[in-house]
Amino acid sequence: MISIPNFTFTSVSNSQKLSPKPEQKNEVIRLSQVWAGYDAHEPILEAINLTVYELDFLGLIGPNGGGKTTLIKVLLGLLKPLKGDVKIMGRSVPQGRRYLGYAPQILEFDRNFPVRVNEVVRMGRLGKRSLFQPYTKKDEEIVIQALEKVEMLDLRNRPIGELSGGQRQRVYIARALASEPQILLLDEPTASVDPKMCSSIYELLLKLNEYMTIVMITHDINTMSSYVKTVGCLNRRLHYHGEQHITPKMLEQTYSNTGDI
């Protein structure tokens, strides 16, 4: 018997947020017949074909071990595909990854580690500088702008260990924004975040999506479905039609025999 998650999708209150993308949108990410993994004999991703258009807000769901984080690593250039082609902004991954900003999951760390919010966000500027080059006035201005966008400027001098999970996630997003990306990659941005802060993070992402493409991995299906523009289901193979709704067939193909809920 097939085990499929019992998802209840939240209704969308603002249809304009999920309006179909115009026909002439530019491609920002394209994967063509991509196979990837850590062992050539047991690939984690199989025959992935995906086209993401500018200003899309794509939510990727799927069971644990289905390849979602592996896909992010391929886009970031941390894992080279076994075969297939990946283009970011029409360029190869080594050339195109400079257009990407990445915000990881909230990770536990030593809360006594002496690093402040603005110092964490400043790390997002490392890729824009030569080795050992000091931070410039422009770097500091961009850090301030990034903190303003995530509404964390007032806490810029606060040790990050004193922040809540939701506040830390905003700081990680600000760090990604400090790299001045055109595409934002998010890995479980609302994991371990209380429902109120979860909603505020999604509202923040909606604002960012007005001028930035977003690709997000999540298990938060019920809430996510009210915000994203398109949804893909990934379990080694990708089931994606460039639409906002998830069909029962997509869920069956993705979660069949996984027992994941």
Image: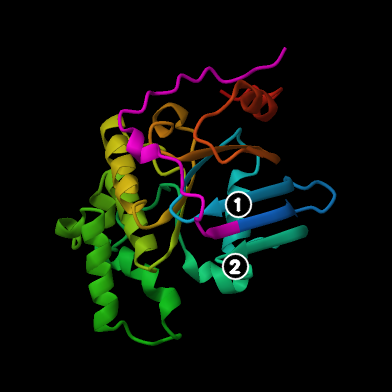
Q: Which mark is residue 51?
A: 1
Q: Earlier in the sequence, mark 1 or mark 2?
A: 1
SS category of the residue bearing label 2: loop
Which residue sits at x=31%, y=28%? 13
Q: Is residue 178 left or right of residue 196?
A: right
Q: Which color scheme is applied?
A: rainbow
Q: Which mark is residue 92?
A: none
**Vertical order, 133 against 171 (above or below):** below
- Marks 1/2: CA–CA distance: 11 Å
Three-letter amino acid code at disc 2?
A: Gly
Q: Secondary structure at mark 1?
A: strand
Which residue lies at the image location 56% right of the left edge and 23% below the top edge?
261
Write down the residue under mark 2: 90
The magenta segment: 1-29
Q: Please give left or right for residue 146 compared with residue 42 in the image.
A: left
Residue, x 35% and y 40% (percent of image)? 17
- Image location of residue 228, percent across then percent down: 43, 39
Quadrant of the rendered structure where residue 135 is? bottom left
Residue 61 is situated, as x and y percent measured from the top left of the image, at 55, 36
Type of residue at label 1?
Thr
From the image, which quarter does the N terminus lie in?
top right
Q: Is residue 22 above or below residue 87?
A: above
| Residue 165 in view (yes/no) | no
Is residue 193 left or right of 45 when viewed as pictured?
Answer: left
Q: Which image quadrant is residue 116 in?
A: bottom left
What residue occupies the far right of the structure in this picture?
A: 41
Q: Residue 135 magenta-drawn?
A: no
How dense is the environment of label 2, judged by Cα within 10 Å: few (below 14), some, or many (20 and up)? some
